[in-house]
Image (cartoon, grey):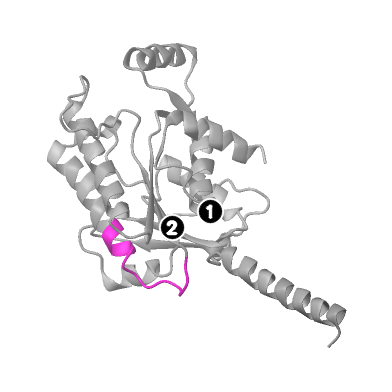
Amino acid sequence: MLPYEFITVYLSQSLELLHKLLAILDRKPKFPTTVKLIVAGSTGFVATELIKQAISSPEITSIIALARRKTSVPQTLDDNADITKFGAVICDDFSNYSESVKKGLEGADACIWLIAITPSKMKDSTLDKARKICVEYTVNGLEMITQLPREKGARPFRFIYVSGHKSERDQSKQPWVMGDYLLMRGEAESRVIDFAQASNGAVEACIVKPGLIDGPDRRQGLVGSVLSTIGRGLIGLPKVDVSQIAATLLEQALKGIEKETLSNEDLIRIGDKVLSG
């Protein structure tokens, strides 16, 4: 072999080897780009807007609405809505899931958890009942859903827990308004985070902490609006529109968790960006 032929062969083989090495270094897990989504607590105000947006998202292949009673398709939908991908699963007991309920939830890629006793509903509840719903149901649901069969090679399961702006994880602190309730909600947040951290990457968690959630159905007159603004100012409660929080929740389920905890300010920022296209 002549010297120049040797050099040509050598360079060709070297380039081929280099390409293989670069391909190995750049190799990343290939996850599906579509999502089967569970919306837990699917009959509420936020869930309705969330489902409305999800039905119109081409990246959402299936929406499973999980609640104690049958969830209906939102009355107002966008022109590109595809209601064929919507399904409802009724669960009578969130402490003990039946096999039929589990079957309906199989194969999900993400769950947005909206089941809770909100501050406005506490007047009709006890702290023990609220704890059962806000903490025990959440942890039990997270454990159950993440044990269900999924497609081979699926991405980490994304669990998005909707809490509240004033919830307190530090159990040594005592908030001056609704202290026991806010500590209890903070405990639920910590339990979700701890579960994800102990999953060895199998579960990704996001805690969403909205303030007052506003929307067309909750808009008040001038007097009510002024009083609401004063009240929010006194307790330091910010506001977010339901469309903004719904868009942010979907973005986390679809594109990945931006960060472990999303504040009200984050919800507005991300929501506006998504909604603006």
User: Which residue is found at the position 67% from the left and 41% from the top?
Assistant: 277
Amino acid under disc 2: Ala
The residue nearer to you, when weighing 177 against 119, is 177
Residue 226, x across and y down, in percent: 44, 11
Q: Earlier in the sequence, mark 1 or mark 2?
A: 2
Above or below, comparing residue 247 to residue 84 in the picture: above
The label on residue 110 is 2
Amino acid at the residue labelled 1: Leu
The span picked out in magenta is: 142-154
Q: Between marks 1 and 2, how big is the CA–CA gap?
A: 8 Å
Residue furthest out toward the bottom: 1
Identify the residue at horizontal 62%, vertical 58% (top origin): 58
Q: Residue at x 15, y 37 (%)?
A: 127
Callout 1 secondary element: helix
Residue under the point 60% across and 41% down: 274
Q: Give the class, few, some or many, for how many residues have Cα within 10 Å of label 1's Cα (few <14, many ≥20).
A: many
Classify residue 175 by image quadrant. Answer: top left
Q: Is residue 34 magenta?
A: no
Residue position for label 1: 254
CB under 8 Å between callouts 1 and 2?
yes
Name the spot of residue 1 as percent of width and height, x first. 83, 88
Q: Nearer the viewer, residue 246 or 143?
A: 143
